[in-house]
Image (tube, rainbow, N blue to C red):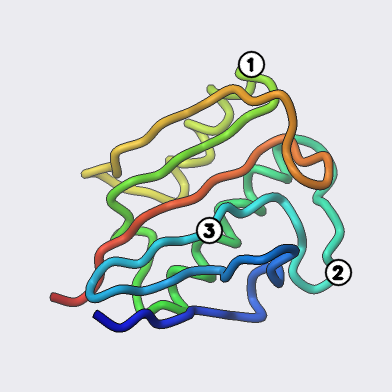
Amino acid sequence: MTRTIISTPLAPAAIGTYSQAVRVGDTVYLSGQIGLDPATMKMADGIDAQIVRVFDNLRAVAEAAGGSLADVVKLNVYLTDLIHFTTVNEVMGCYFAEPFPARAAVGVASLPRGALVEADAVMVVGG
């Protein structure tokens, strides 16, 4: 199968050796997004703003791949403090509707650029 690289200026440019997303067949693998504003490449201020920015960034990449967050089948969320898990759930409710994707939420020691939250996803489009 052919791999197609997905890229959009509506999400932060890759800050390492990775692509924003890779499509193989009907499956799209979305790289982790942190709370960077794609226009300024500066981190959103505070956990609430970072969570919103993360989901905005994921949505932009999903749309660039020809899908939407409704096509996400698996979501991974990484938090530097699991106390914010409830806030992630609340914000997710603004971006996802039932049936919700499968999800993991993991507490981590640190994230790139001092981010407080990161999320990556797998979505299935077309078919």
Name the side, left or right, on which 52 lies relative to 22. right
User: Which residue is at the front of the view, 90 or 101?
Assistant: 101
In this view, 80 is above or below 63: above
The residue positioned farthest toward the top in the image shown:
83
Instruction: State which mark lies toward you, 2 or 3.
Output: 3
Q: Amino acid at mark 3?
A: Ser
Residue assigned mark 2: 40
- How many tags in the picture? 3
Q: Quadrant of residue 101?
A: top left
In this view, 94 is above or below 15: above
Neighbor class of circle 3 (other Cα within 10 Å; few <14, some 14-19, many 20+) is some
Q: Quadrant of the N terminus?
A: bottom left
Q: Which tag, 2 or 3, sits closer to the chain's start? A: 3
Q: Quadrant of residue 12?
A: bottom right
Name the side, left or right, on which 53 lies relative to 64. right
Residue 115 percent coordinates (x, y): 76, 41
Q: Which mark is residue 31?
A: 3
| CA distance for labels 1 and 2 | 28 Å
| CA distance for labels 2 and 3 | 19 Å
Residue 119 percent coordinates (x, y): 54, 45
What residue appears at the point 25 percent right and 64 percent down from the top-left corner?
Answer: 124
Residue assigned mark 1: 83
Neighbor class of circle 1 (other Cα within 10 Å; few <14, some 14-19, many 20+) is few
Residue 81 percent coordinates (x, y): 68, 20
Q: Quadrant of the C terminus?
A: bottom left
Q: Amino acid at mark 1?
A: Ile
For the residues bearing labels 1 and 3, Cβ distance under 8 angstroms:
no
